[in-house]
Image (cartoon, helix red, strand yellow):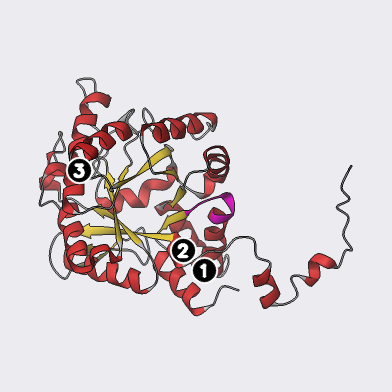
């Protein structure tokens, strides 16, 4: 029998008439616990170094990163994501600083966990671009091509270094083949059984990463591009295959990056695999909202919240966003109806 979906034309309008009824029938809800706050780490003490390309975003020294983590928890944000701005003198072709037990990432992780324990989660990025002199995510061969298998050895050691420092979630963003399985095996052998892996499974070779590369100091050092290992923006089926491989290798959750330009990938990933799917609202997406609001395109808070709810509507369990603290404040104060 064919269902009749004809409604009296006023019925839907009645459900939108007031703020309370809009809230009552809302299909998707954004909460502070859906947000992960990316934080950039700088050397020094008492340092707040604004990132010019990201209005409102700074690099913080380790002591102030701890304060940001406390702020996040007070706002109801459950996890922070850490990214180091490694000084140029500590970068090398082999990315050896990634294995230093006292590097910026490990010091910040330890400091947060010492101060807060399990009150907040710490997600750490696994890739070599913050540590290499050439700005690539992996080790280069004699022809300047990223060597997948040599890089895997470094990535597993980097992941173990971060887990030993107290990381709760290891997030490999390098896009090397087989890295999730290799990292999972390494963590299990080291008795890090509860450390999660959030795989950057569908990471595209995007034009939206520029401000991030400036924030971590790899923008000026990057030689060439990353199209040989990051995904072609024209492909969607390939993303599903990448996600399937990472799940099979032991990923606890998967990520689509960037977010807004790839909502179709988020939707497909959730529909086809029914695992936790996260989106990274990347630096370029953030910067465009800030620039648009400054130019009078629309209200900043409204633009911010509309984009964030789009990720939830597409199927995200959570969102990595530089708007996390601002969005959490709005949600706490009830200014989003």
Residue on which the image places disc 3: 191
- Where residue 333 appears, x then y in whole percent? 49, 79
Q: Are marks 1 and 2 in contact (CB under 8 Å)?
A: yes
Left or right: 65, with 175 as reference point: left
Q: Is residue 314 above or below residue 324?
A: above
Instruction: Give the SS element for disc 3.
Output: loop
Nearest to N terminus: mark 1 or mark 2: 2
Residue on which the image places disc 1: 300
Q: Residues within 10 Å of mark 2 (few under 14, many from 20)?
A: many
Q: Is residue 230 above or below residue 279?
A: above
Q: Which residue is drawn at the image coordinates 39% and 47% (left, top)?
A: 209
Numbered badge on residue 290: 2
Instruction: Give the SS element for disc 1.
Output: helix
Left or right: 217, with 30 as reference point: left
Residue 79 appearing in the image? yes
Residue 316 falls within the magenta-colored stretch: yes
Q: Which residue is drawn at the image coordinates 44% and 58% (left, top)?
A: 286
- Where residue 307 appears, x then y in whole percent? 54, 58
Front residue of this view, candidates 92 and 256: 256
Numbered badge on residue 81: none
Q: Residues within 10 Å of mark 3 (few under 14, many from 20)?
A: few
Nearest to N terminus: mark 3 or mark 1: 3
The extreme top residue here reads 143
Magenta-drawn segment? 312-317
Which image quadrant for residue 224?
top left
Front residue of this view, candidates 254 and 275: 275
Q: Nearer the viewer, mark 3 or mark 1?
A: 3
């Amino acid at each position: 029998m064919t269902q009749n979906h004809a409604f009296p034309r006023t019925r839907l309008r009645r459900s939108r008439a007031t703020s309370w009824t809009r809230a009552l029938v809302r299909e998707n809800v954004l909460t502070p616990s859906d947000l992960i706050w990316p934080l950039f780490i700088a050397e020094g003490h008492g340092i707040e170094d604004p990132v010019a390309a990201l209005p409102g975003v700074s690099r913080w020294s380790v002591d102030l990163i701890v304060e940001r983590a406390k702020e996040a928890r007070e706002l109801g944000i459950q996890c922070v994501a850490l990214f180091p701005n490694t000084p140029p003198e500590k970068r090398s072709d082999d990315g050896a600083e990634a294995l230093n037990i006292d590097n910026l990432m490990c010091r910040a992780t330890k400091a947060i966990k010492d101060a807060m324990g399990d009150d907040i989660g710490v997600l750490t990025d696994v890739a070599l671009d913050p540590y290499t002199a050439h700005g690539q995510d992996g080790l280069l061969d004699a022809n300047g091509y990223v060597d997948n298998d040599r890089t895997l050895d470094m990535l597993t050691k980097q992941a173990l270094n971060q887990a030993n420092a107290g990381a709760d979630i290891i997030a490999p963003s390098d896009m090397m083949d087989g890295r999730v399985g290799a990292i999972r095996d390494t963590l299990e052998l080291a008795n890090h059984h509860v450390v999660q892996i959030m795989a950057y499974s569908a990471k595209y070779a995007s034009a939206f990463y520029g401000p991030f590369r400036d924030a971590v100091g790899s923008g000026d050092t990057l030689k060439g591009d990353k199209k040989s290992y990051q995904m072609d923006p024209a492909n969607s089926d390939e993303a599903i295959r990448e996600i399937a491989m990472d799940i099979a290798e032991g990923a606890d959750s998967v990520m689509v990056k960037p977010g807004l330009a790839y909502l179709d990938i988020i939707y497909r990933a959730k529909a086809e695999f029914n695992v936790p799917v996260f989106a990274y609202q990347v630096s370029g997406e953030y910067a465009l909202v800030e620039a648009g609001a400054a130019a009078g395109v629309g209200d900043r808070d409204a633009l911010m919240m509309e984009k964030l709810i789009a990720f939830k509507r597409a199927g995200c369990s959570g969102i990595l966003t530089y708007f996390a603290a601002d969005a959490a404040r709005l949600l706490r104060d009830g200014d989003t109806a």
